[in-house]
Amino acid sequence: MTTQYVQEIDVNIAVAKWLHSNGWQLERISMPHGRGIDSIRNKAKLEAEFTAVGISISNIEFRPTGEDIRARKDGILWRIECKSLGADLPSSTVRSQFDRALSSTVSNYNQRGRLRLGLALPEEYNKLVRGRVPQALREAINLWILLYVSADDEVVVFAPEKEIPEGS
C-alpha cells in the first residue's frame, strides 16, 4: 500500500463539517493526542475551519477520551471513530491500526436503536474496510463507513446497507 500522511485532525474536521452540513448537532469531539501530535495547533486549526463554515464551538464539549465525534439529530445519536494514516508504514502496521479503530468503533455500541456508529478513515483504508468489515456486521450494528478523500477534502459516506465499491 503506497500511503501518504493523513492527520487524524483532518479526518475529524472533514467529518464534523459533513455532519454539520447535513443538519447534525455536534456535541463532543475528542482531540487527537499522543506522541508527535501538536494538540494546541490542532485545536486552533479545528476552530479556524469551523469558524470558516459557521460552526460554533461554544456548545461542543472537548474531551481527551471517548468517541472522536458525537453528534445528534432527531433523537438519533451518532458516535464516530476517526483514524489517521501514516506515511510509508508497513502494511502490517496499517492493518493493526485499522483493527484498533474498528475495535474502538464497535466498543461504542452501547444501545440498540437510535444509534449510528461511524468509522471515518482516509480512503486508502478502502481495501481493508471491504475485506475486514462484513456487510452483515455493518447492518447488524448500524455501522456507517465515512471515507475521507484528502485530495478533495471531502467525505464519501456509505450507509450500512450500501456496498462499498472498489477504489471508493
Image: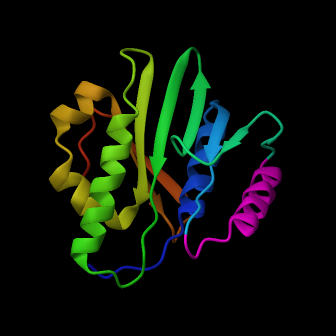
Would residue 168 be seen by someone viewing this image from the given angle? no
Q: Main secondary structure of the magenta part?
A: helix
Asked whether 37 falls inside the magenta stretch, the response is yes
Residue at 50% in and 71% down: 6
Q: Is residue 6 left or right of residue 160?
A: right
Q: Is residue 79 above or below residue 114?
A: below
Nearer-the-camera pick, 19 or 94: 94
Q: Is residue 127 left or right of residue 32?
A: left
Q: Is residue 101 above or below residue 75?
A: below
Assign the C terminus to one quadrant of the image: bottom left
Nearer-the-camera pick, 7 or 24: 7
Q: Is residue 104 left or right of residue 141?
A: right
Asked whether 74 falls inside the magenta stretch, the response is no
Residue at 18% in and 52% down: 132
Residue at 16% in and 32% down: 136
Which residues make up the magenta segment?
35-53
Would residue 143 be seen by someone viewing this image from the given angle? yes
